[in-house]
Amino acid sequence: MDRSKFKFKTEIRVRNYEVDWQGIVHNAVYLLYFETGRIEYFRALGLRIDLESIKHGNRMVLVRNEINYRAPAKFDDLLDVHTRISAIRNTSYVMEGLLLVHRSDKLIGENVAVHVWLDPTTDRPKTISDTFRRAVQQFEGDSVVIEWPTYLA
């Protein structure tokens, strides 16, 4: 992943209960770090991620979550979680994440997460809102691939 394309970053510190018997962060915890990055990304864009917004059509579910582990993180490490949306399709969008030791080039892991936008009453995929597309495009600029619905073409 091209680190220069990531415009958003949040920090997280490794806590003692996240470390396994080998003295490194347990592999499942990295999923939580990337999820934290995704939620903070949406906050930075000014998008609501709460129960009330889900009732009004902003229901997004994770359908793929892939991690490449590159190096272990350890207790009390300060980590930078870089997050971006790289693509928006008709009913899904792709988020990417990089996890690095704070203020360094030491790569801990990479993440690709695919989400699907669902209708909250039917649980069926629905077209991603234009508001969401515009907010992401405004923030990401040319580094995001957005497929606009045909009625906007």
Image (spheres, rainbow, N blue to C red):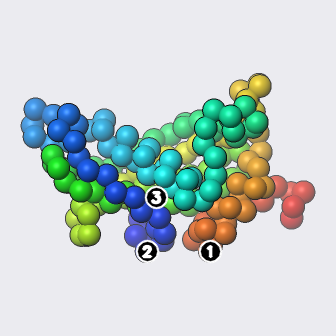
Dividing the image into 4 quarters, which one contains the C terminus? bottom right
Q: Position of residue 134 (x, y in %)?
A: 72, 62
Task: Report the disc number at residue 83.
Answer: 3
Distance from Cα at disc 2 to Cα at disc 1: 12 Å
* Side (left or right) of 35 relative to 85: left
* Side (left or right) of 97 relative to 59: left
Find numbered disc 1 in the image and state the secondary structure of the residue it sits on. Answer: helix
Disc 1: which residue = 142
State the residue at coordinates (48%, 52%): 40
State the residue at coordinates (66%, 69%): 138
Out of 42 and 87, give the one closest to the viewer: 42
Disc 2: which residue = 4
Q: Residue furthest left?
A: 22
Find numbered disc 3 in the image and state the secondary structure of the residue it sits on. Answer: strand
* Label 2–label 1 contact, CB within 8 A: no
Distance from Cα at disc 3 to Cα at disc 1: 16 Å
